Amino acid sequence: MMLTNGSGKRMMLRNDSGKNPHIRIPQGLRDILPTEASHRRMIENIIREVFTGWGYGEVIPPTFEYFDYISRGLGEDKKKGLVRLFDKNGELLALRSELTAPIARMTAMRFKSMGFPLRLFYFANVFSDESPRLSHQRERTQAGAELIGSDSPHADAEVIALVIEALLQVGLKDFKIGIGQIDFISKVLRLTGISELDQKEMKRALVRKDMVAIKNGLKELDSSRAESILETITLRGDAEVIVRASRYARDEASSSALARLSDIHKTLVRSGYRSHIFLDLGIVRDFDYYSSVVFEGYSPRIGYPFCGGGRYDYLLGMFGVDAPSTGFAIEVERLHDALSREDGEREVKRPKVLVASAQDNFLDIMSVASWLRRKGIVAQHFLGEFSLEEAKTYARRMAMDFLLIIISMEEEMDLIDLKKDLIQRVAPEEMERLMEDQLKTVSVRYRGEGNDT
């Protein structure tokens, strides 16, 4: 950066951080650098294998759609956060802020005649223009699954089991899925005589976990009704939650809502997932389309949910299809954050080799690098006039494991272990054995790269 001092002479200001203060990106957006991008692709690939293994088929909805369709079931708060645009015909469009409504629209258009239940999954970026917070980015990546056309509690148990299996397969160990019942909470609030407007405010406060706002909203109720609501929304634990909550099930509908939650919990416990689930009647998701059982995933290492979902029995009805459904979305960035902070996390790392030629023979470099890649090794070409020091410096800067210098394709090569700073001179026929040794699994801890929002 150039400035002038008092005498008019130009001065160069160093930017030791490597950042140009005049180049920036909008608040709430970020660049994903190679190490994190590699980790995230690994996470996505594993989750994709889990989803397909459970019989779910991948779909890719458009990035933007008509505002009217993409906003159905979102609620006023979420609608305000949609990124809007107009097409050349003046039609109001919006970038997707989640995938459930777009997949509901897709189902009504593409799958209506196929029969249900239908199992779909997706990986997609989503966008919102909400005020960026520490845990909120304006562009995020979600991985999710939808089980469409079944009102069975077994469908709810299936999608919760699916998200647990996906998390276990990516290597997350310390996590819990909290399971709530928004239908039961709605009925308890209604039976206590709280107005429709106050019920909405209460649910917004529950989404924020704002107990001060909740208690303020109950001030006009008599103490017994206020206490019943407070106890209900703070019930957390195992099967005893159902027993304690049943005291407030004052009609058949609320009893039925609790019975559904109990069935799902029993199914998951009997399927071996007890250590990863708990019941929490204070969970209220921040989408209006949820109608029954809801759930969220938590890690003790991050302060916000990294996945969430639930049952939405009426959303597809907004598109003309009667299909009760359930599903979830995993926030990939948040999951990566939880993994990166969890002790003992490992990633399989392929050896990386920079290939150079002492004779500056680029055809030799291309030939050897291609051979290495066929062996499963990451190989990069050294460009420019050969210099041992320059090649080593560049290789270390690019986090290479080895520098391979071709002395002669017929006679010998130098293999430099950059971590140990050791050099081996080997004949070409020995190279295959050495490289196969390097293909043994290497584990490294997750590590982050400097990313700024």
Image (tube, grey):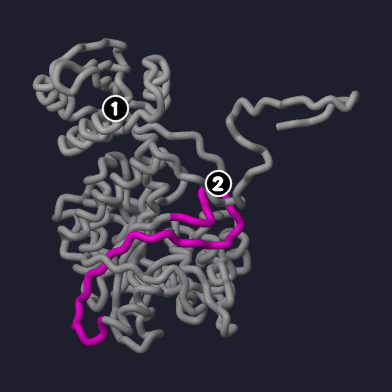
Q: Which residues are magenta?
A: 111-140
Q: Amino acid at mark 1?
A: Asn
User: In which quadrant will I find the C terminus?
Assistant: top right
Tag of residue 374: none
Residue 104 seen by the camera: yes
- The residue sitting at 50% across, 60% down in the picture is 206
Residue at 30% from the left image edge and 70% from the top image edge:
326
Q: Are marks 2 and 1 in contact (CB under 8 Å)?
A: no
Which quadrant, please, contains the N terminus?
top right
State the SS at label 1. loop
Q: Nearer the viewer, residue 397 or 344?
A: 397
Q: Amino acid at mark 2?
A: Leu
Is residue 170 depicted above or below 279 in this figure?
above
Q: Is 289 on the left or on the right of 272, as rendered? A: right
Residue drawn at (26%, 35%) of the image: 366
| Mark 2 or mark 1: whose residue is earlier in sequence | 2
Instruction: Tell me, yes or no, whether the highlighted magenta stretch contains residue 332.
Output: no
Q: SS for tag 2? A: loop
For label 2, the residue is: 134
Mark 1 crowdedness (10 Å alpha carbons): few <14, some 14-19, many ≥20: some
User: Where is residue 255 drawn, in percent x and y?
Assistant: 31, 73
What residue does disc 1 label?
Answer: 361
